[in-house]
């Protein structure tokens, strides 16, 4: 399971070093794509295949499903984790998430989210303020 929050640096060659704990979980090949809330999603290859298969089954006659498929699939890039535990972030994904030199990697169960540090801090503050209400909603659904 991918969990935890780590601050890392995106180098001048657009390479991002993965935390050692994440390297063990994700393996040698990952897929990075546009994510939600202005971050990137990084999936282990096996998890990505499962998501892509689900997207393939969506009805393409519906605008929302076409849009989400395009958003995730067209924006995706397969990349290898190099010997130093780094991945390459293409310019279009770097620009999408406004990644600068300081980057937050957040483990979220089956994926790693890659955030601009400032955007992450702002998002985290907003979510923390609403945590009680989210817990109430999840409790009503029988999850908590």
Image (spheres, grey):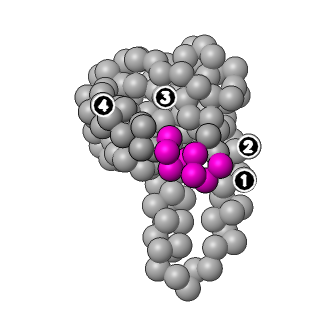
Q: Residues within 10 Å of mark 2 (few under 14, many from 20)?
A: few
- How many numbered discs? 4
144 is within the stretch colored magenta: no
Horizontal and vertical percent for residue 65?
53, 73
Circle 2: element type:
helix
Q: Which residues are magenta?
A: 135-142
Where is the N terminus found, in terms of image quarters? top right
Question: Upstream in the sequence, badge 3 or badge 4?
Answer: 3
Closer to us: mark 4 or mark 2? 4
Crowding around mark 1 (Cα neighbors within 10 Å: few <14, some 14 to 19, many 20+) is few
Query: If you read the primary sequence from the N terminus, does the residue marked by circle 3 or circle 1 appear first?
Result: 1
The reply to whether the C-beta atoms of the residues labelled 3 and 1 are less than 8 Å apart is no
**Mark 2–mark 1 contact, CB under 8 Å?**
yes
- Residue 94 visible from this viewpoint: no
Seen at 37% across and 32% down, the residue is: 128
Q: Is residue 114 visible?
A: yes
* Pointer 3 residue: 106
According to the picture, the residue beneath numbered tag 4 turns out to be: 125
73 versus 138 height, above or below: below
Q: Which residue is mark 2?
A: 46
Query: Dots 3 and 2: beta carbons under 8 Å?
Result: no
Foreground label between 3 and 4: 4
Q: Main secondary structure of the magenta part?
A: helix
Q: Is residue 74 above or below residue 40?
A: below
Which quadrant would residue 144 be assigned to in this image?
Answer: top right
């Amino acid at each position: 399971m991918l969990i935890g929050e780590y601050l890392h640096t995106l180098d001048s060659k657009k390479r991002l070093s993965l935390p050692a704990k994440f390297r063990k979980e994700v393996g040698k090949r990952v897929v990075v794509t546009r994510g939600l809330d202005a971050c990137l999603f990084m999936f282990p290859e096996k998890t990505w295949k499962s998501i892509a298969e689900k997207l393939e089954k969506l009805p393409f006659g519906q605008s929302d499903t076409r849009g989400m498929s395009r958003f995730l699939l067209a924006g995706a890039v397969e990349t290898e984790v190099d010997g130093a535990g780094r991945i390459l972030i293409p310019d279009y994904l770097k620009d999408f998430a406004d990644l600068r030199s300081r980057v937050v990697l957040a483990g979220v169960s089956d994926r790693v989210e890659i955030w601009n540090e400032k955007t992450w801090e702002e998002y985290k503050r907003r979510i923390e303020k609403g945590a009680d209400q989210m817990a109430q909603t999840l409790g009503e659904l029988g999850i908590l």
